[in-house]
Image (tube, grey):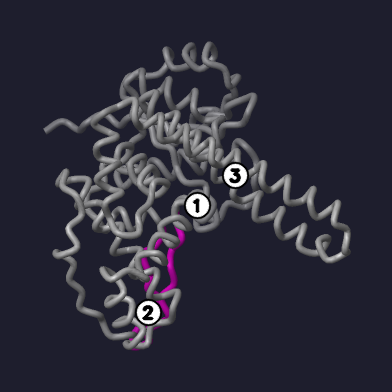
Amino acid sequence: MPNQPTPTIIGCDVSSKEIVIAYANANQAVKTIANTQKAIVAWLKQLPEDTVIGMEATGRYHDTLADCAASSGRRVYVINPKQLSLYAKGVGQRGKTDPLDAGVIARYVAREGDQLPPYTVPTPTQRMIRNLLSQRAGIVKHCGAIRQCLRDTDSNGSCVLKRAHQKALQSLQALLAEIDSQLKACVKTEAALEQKRALLQTITGVGLLNSLTLTHRFDRTPFANSDAVVAAYGLDPRPKDSGNKIGQRRLTKQGNAEDRRLIYLAAQSAAKTKTFKPMYSALREKGFATAESIVIIARKLLRIAFAVWNSNKPFDPQKISFQPCAKP
């Protein structure tokens, strides 16, 4: 049989103003184009139809390139920056410049592309939910930093300053409440999506915010199984064994840190209920620490959420079963 033609594989290092383009085929020169829709569309027209394009996730800077490339029929990969950073160190990259980074992306896609999920253009609802969740995560992070900064100044005895601090935090809390309201309204624009969100909220411990986050996750990503969901949240343990030595497992902590924090809080709430308290108690009796027990329940919640999403049936506490494993 004749050999299949090798597709053109391109790595793109995206910044706010320009895109540096490198080819997996080292014989082709690195080039730079403006990060504008007009420049991107003109460049895409010059490429073969089977071109594969990889880029690093960069907040919103990569959105135009990813959307235009995927809409043109090209296979597109948006890659986790942490994965690319580790890969660059693994292949011995000896410096960090935009052309070098673009070259590493092209090399990564050429060798690992078959294991990566292809990018699809989000619907307007999906994009709005993603942006609102991203804004919310940033505000929550800064709220924590502000509370930490104000902890010392509150001890100076100034009532006026303390009231000003409280007012600032209350304003941020009001902003978070408005974002939550916008998120709920956004999901309600699609009846089928709202129905699935409501089913997710029937899970013990899962409130409105977690149901919205899970809805966005499941609607945007076609997870193959519940293990993939746990891995996407970074709650899968990383083995560290060698020969007869069994090392200590640690969480991979891949993916969105705010989503991971939210499902952990949901597990904390669930552990206090009659549905999950027996599981929590059994884990503690087996020797698991408090945090370890909560993480195990968080994984259980994600698996239940995956089942609820795919079955279109509400959570049934009667179906919960648990056999506590021995602590390693």
Label located before the other in sequence (3 or 2)? 3
Label 3 CA crowd tier, 10 Å (few <14, some 14–19, many 20+):
few
Does the stretch in magenta take in 261?
A: no
Q: Quadrant of the C terminus?
A: bottom left
Residue drawn at x 76%, y 63% is 151
Label located before the other in sequence (1 or 2)? 2
Whether residue 315 sits left or right of residue 25 in the image: it is left
Q: CA distance from mark 3 to mark 2?
A: 36 Å
Whether residue 42 sits left or right of residue 243 in the image: it is right
Mark 1 in CB contact with mark 2 (< 8 angstroms): no
Label 2 CA crowd tier, 10 Å (few <14, some 14–19, many 20+):
few
Q: Quadrant of the N terminus?
A: top left
Does the stretch in magenta take in 253?
A: yes
Magenta part mainly helix, strand or loop? Answer: loop
Residue drawn at x 86%, y 51% is 160
Residue 234: horizontal and vertical position, in percent?
Answer: 41, 59
Circle number at residue 241: 2
Residue 199 visible, this orientation? yes
> What range of the chain is rendered magenta?
234-254
Q: Secondary structure at mark 3?
A: helix
Residue 221: horizontal and vertical position, in percent?
Answer: 31, 41
Which residue is the extreme one toward the left?
1
Residue 171: horizontal and vertical position, in percent?
Answer: 67, 41
Circle number at residue 138: 3
Q: Nearer the viewer, mark 3 or mark 2?
A: 3
Q: What amino acid is found at the position of numbered circle 2 in the picture? A: Asp
Q: What amino acid is found at the position of numbered circle 1 in the picture? A: Glu
Image vertical order of residue 286 relative to residue 259, above or below? below
Circle number at residue 15: none
Circle number at residue 258: 1
In terms of depth relative to the viewer, which is nearer, 9 or 139?
A: 139
Image vertical order of residue 15 relative to residue 160, above or below? above
